[in-house]
Image (cartoon, rainbow, N blue to C red):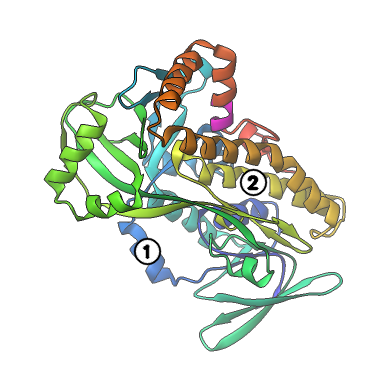
Amino acid sequence: MSNRYDVVIIGGGIVGNTLALILANANLRVALVEALPKTQLRSLGANKRTIVLSYSSRLIFEALGFWPFLENYACPIHKIHVSDRGQYGTSKIEAHEENIPALGYVLSANAIGSIVLQHVYQHHNITVLQPAQFCSHQENVDEIVVTIRSGNEEIKLRSDLLIAADGHNSAVRKFQEIGVKKQDYQQTAIFCNLELKRSHQNTAYERFTSEGPLAILPLLKNQAAVIWTVSSEKAMKLMEMSDPIFLHSLQDHFGYRLGRFLACSERGSLPLSLITAEKQISSKVVLVGNAAHTLHPVAGQGLNLALRDVAVLAEELLHAKKHNLPLWDHQVLRNYFNHRQVDQRKVIGLTNSLVGLFSTSLLPIMLARSSGLILLDRLSGLKKTLTRTTLGFSGKVPRLACGLTVE
């Protein structure tokens, strides 16, 4: 096996795998390093955590050729209903206002991961090394040498560029000694699926409460996914409840707009923080996905932002290749970072401000945000700007998200 590649990607999750496929489709040789063995990855089928794909993410997957496979598992969102528990303000966003078939699509993380992974395994330009772990790297004048460990064997991979897609505890980021800014929300997200008595009619509900947002998202077969953000202390109590008591508490917080909740699946939980790397590019290294920024799940933006990042990164790298520039060229990486700043700042700012604004029970703020929801519903310009940001059409929009090929 040759150990010389155009790009080495550490992390075989959805983000790393998607980037690998974009680059491989353009005839770059990619080494993909994943810590989990294939058998353990298959066992992740039990992971029912739900993902909301924005419309721009659907277009990226469509351009890569596997949206038809994902569509079988995806429930389209035609309308989003935003409300503030105990207040009169509401706002509605509808797909037809943007002349698109859906505002987003709801499906399990496992469905996305499995289908993307199948395409990775089948691609002749991608070498998957697993189980293998990143150990270190050494930067030379014109290449980077990455050392990984697989079992008792150390393997050295030579490449133009190292890309870290290895999550919020990124080993590459730590080796680079890149610091992070962390804001602990002191909140935990509880997630599960519901069986509904009444049809959801492809409507997603985002209900803000004093403890955090409660999202109920449409799934196929008249089911719904719950992402309920509460204080970490309350989350422990919710996780310990029996299903009937949990359903009663959830129903009390949401109401009966969807009728009575009939049953719920096994619950999972996730502590929430905003984590941003102090640098996303460093010489011959680029951080993407949760290694670069981990967001609060409100408005479902984390994965979608990361997919737009890697789509633009691929554009810049392929442009460099076309013009015989090294992939690590400083200006190439700087162009990528500069192009992504507008979108990243808007999305991170939006999610962070929503958490702060809607996680308080102070009466003046509650009245102000209720009025704000009413204004948002009436001011079409403001509403359109917010909608386009959440759809993924803010800042430099990737060519893939415009139905164009990457050149």
Indicate the amino acid at tag 2.
Asp
Residue at the disc numbered 1:
42
**For the view shown, which residue lies furthest in the top direction?**
378
Identify which residue is drawn at 51% across, 55% down: 119
Where 180 sits versus 147, above or below?
A: above
Residue named by callout 2: 309
**Picture coordinates of residue 367, whole percent (x, y):** 42, 20
Q: Dot 1 surroundings within 10 Å: few (below 14), some, or many (20 or more)?
A: few
Image quadrant containing the C terminus: top right
In which quadrant of the rendered image does the N terminus lie?
A: bottom right
Looking at the picture, which amino acid does disc 1 mark?
Arg
Rendering coords of residue 189 (x, y %): 36, 48
Left or right: 45 with respect to 348? Answer: left
Judged from the image, the secondary structure of the residue bearing numbered disc 1 is helix
Q: Nearer the viewer, residue 333 or 68?
A: 333
The segment highlighted magenta reads 387-391
Q: Which of the two discs, 1 and 2, sits closer to the camera?
A: 2
Q: Nearer the viewer, residue 214 or 119?
A: 214
Name the side, left or right, on which 160 lies relative to 42. Answer: right
Left or right: where 322 falls relative to 247: right
- Residue at 54% in and 25% down: 387
Label 2: which secondary element: helix
Classified by dominant secondary structure, the portion drawn in magenta counts as helix
In the picture as drawn, the residue positioned furthest to the bottom comes out as: 152
Q: Residue 266, labelled with which disc?
A: none
Whether residue 78 appears in this view of the structure is no
Q: Is residue 259 above or below residue 233?
A: above
- In the rendered image, residue 250, in percent from the top left (x then y), is placed at 22, 38
